[in-house]
Image (cartoon, rainbow, N blue to C red):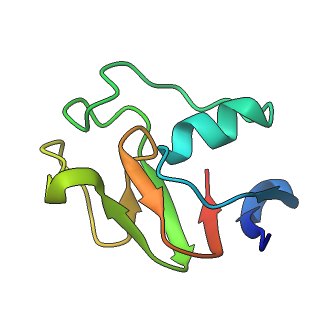
Amino acid sequence: MTYSTIKIYNKNYIIYYKPQKIPLLLILKHNNVYIEHQCQQGFCGVCKVKLLKGNIYYENNISPLAYHALGDIFPCCCIAKNNIEIKI
């Protein structure tokens, strides 16, 4: 089985995981990386982080409604397509 990685830039931390269709927030939680969150549906924007490298997608092509700038992603409802690098 091939593993993907999530590199957390500002914490110098790398997570290795089996690619699955689960939100990034859950992968982070299971690896003891805490990100503040509330709605877990992309409405509030509390969990917003910067995607520095790699690609993500949102399940069912739903775009988050919370305000965000270019490069912002919402771990509560995004799924990593491959190796990614984020800044929390």
Q: Position of residue 88 (x, y in %)?
A: 61, 50
Image quadrant assignment for residue 68: bottom left
The answer to which of 11 and 82 lies nearer the viewer is: 82
Q: Does residue 63 show up?
A: no
Q: Residue at x 65, y 75 (%)?
A: 83
Q: Is residue 36 above or below residue 42?
A: above
Q: Is residue 12 above or below residue 32?
A: below
The answer to which of 27 and 69 lies nearer the viewer is: 27
Q: Name the outermost residue toward the top.
A: 38
Q: Position of residue 23 (x, y in %)?
A: 47, 44
Q: Does residue 12 show up?
A: yes
Q: Is residue 75 above or below residue 40?
A: below
Q: Residue at x 30, y 21 (%)?
A: 39
Q: Is residue 22 above or below residue 34?
A: below
The answer to which of 57 and 46 lies nearer the viewer is: 57
- Split into 4 quadrants, where in the image is the N terminus? bottom right
Q: Position of residue 13 (x, y in %)?
A: 86, 56
Judge from the rendering whether residue 12 lies leftward or rightward of residue 34; answer left or right.
right
Judge from the rendering whether residue 65 lies leftward or rightward of residue 36; answer left or right.
left
Across the whole image, how many numbered discs are drawn on residues? 0
Q: Position of residue 51 (x, y in %)?
A: 50, 68
Q: Residue at x 73, y 31 (%)?
A: 30
Image quadrant assignment for residue 18: bottom right
Q: Residue at x 58, y 75 (%)?
A: 82
Q: Name the outermost residue toward the front.
A: 1
